[in-house]
Image: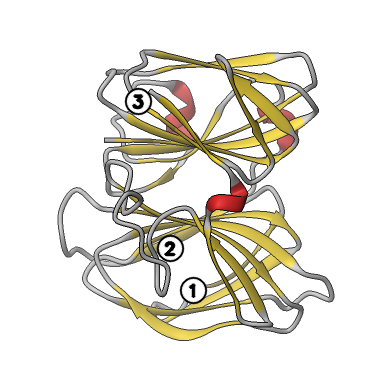
Amino acid sequence: MIELRPFESLGSANHGWLDAHHHFSFAGYQDPARVNWGSLRVWNDDIIAPGNGFPTHPHSDMEIITYVRKGAITHTDSMGNEGRTEAGDVQVMSAGNGVRHSEYNREDEETELFQIWIIPDSRGGTPNWGARTFPKGERAGAFVTLASGQKSDGANDNDALPIRTNARVLGATIKAGDSVTYDIADASRHLYLVPAKGKVRIENVEAKARDGVAITGLTSLSVTALEDSEVVLVDAA
């Protein structure tokens, strides 16, 4: 099954400082048909105005992955971590048994990002945070694992940020006319792909920037770029 979820069909809320679009039920947007996709619970497409952000607030029992599409986000938390994650890079927070954090756009331009929440395999545990630079050149024409909770059955997983769930988050840049493939361990897996930029085709389904594509029942995924594209993919149980 390959289901296109156009950007225009997503839930949305514009708070002035935050223009948010929700691929799944979140806050005031509730759709019983879009609560989760396997263990993937949240995919928010956020645009944050300069000098604004999310003040300190708590999380627990969730793997939270932030993929920055434009600008940068500055993170601080109750574990004493502080970091600035720039466009194309990723940060991961395992909330575990509880953590408080803030996320702010300290830049002089809007910050655009995907915030992805995946349900952990088990509750509790010590919270953790990490961020990593992934040069886009390393993703040209191939999927690169950005975060993974799988048992390193691929070399790329060894360089990925760890998450506590049977899932992967991957990124790729694809030149117009080229294709990238991803082998899926089990046809029961739940894949969700969003182009950060450009336009792509998966079999006979075309997706433009910020559309969502929900995929299951496949053992191999081929993504063809109709324009120069940058895509983010979650492979979840």
Quarter of the image with the N terminus is top left
**Residue placed under numbered mark 3 in the picture:** 216
Q: Secondary structure at mark 3?
A: loop
Instruction: Mark 1 or mark 2: name the one nearer the start of the chain.
Output: 1
Determine contact: label 1, label 2, CB under 8 Å: yes
Looking at the image, residue 207 sits to the left or right of residue 177; the answer is left
Q: Which mark is residue 109?
A: none
Residue 191, relative to residue 66: is it above or below?
A: above
- Residue placed most toward the observer, 210 or 56: 210
Looking at the picture, how far across and down is residue 231, in whole percent? 63, 35
Q: How many marks?
A: 3
Q: Which mark is residue 129?
A: 2
Q: Residues within 10 Å of mark 2 (few under 14, many from 20)?
A: many
Q: Which mark is residue 81?
A: 1
Instruction: Mark 1 or mark 3: name the one nearer the start of the chain.
Output: 1
Q: Spatial distance from mark 1 to mark 2, Cα to Cα?
A: 7 Å
Q: Residue at x 58, y 43 (%)?
A: 6
Quarter of the image with the C terminus is top left
Looking at the picture, how far across and down is residue 53, in whole percent? 61, 80
Q: Residues within 10 Å of mark 1 (few under 14, many from 20)?
A: few
Type of amino acid under label 3: Thr
Q: Spatial distance from mark 1 to mark 3, Cα to Cα?
A: 37 Å
Residue 237, relative to residue 109: is it above or below?
A: above
Residue 111 visible to an observer of this rendering = yes
Determine contact: label 3, label 2, CB under 8 Å: no
Q: Residue at x 26, y 75 (%)?
A: 98
Q: Residue at x 76, y 79 (%)?
A: 50
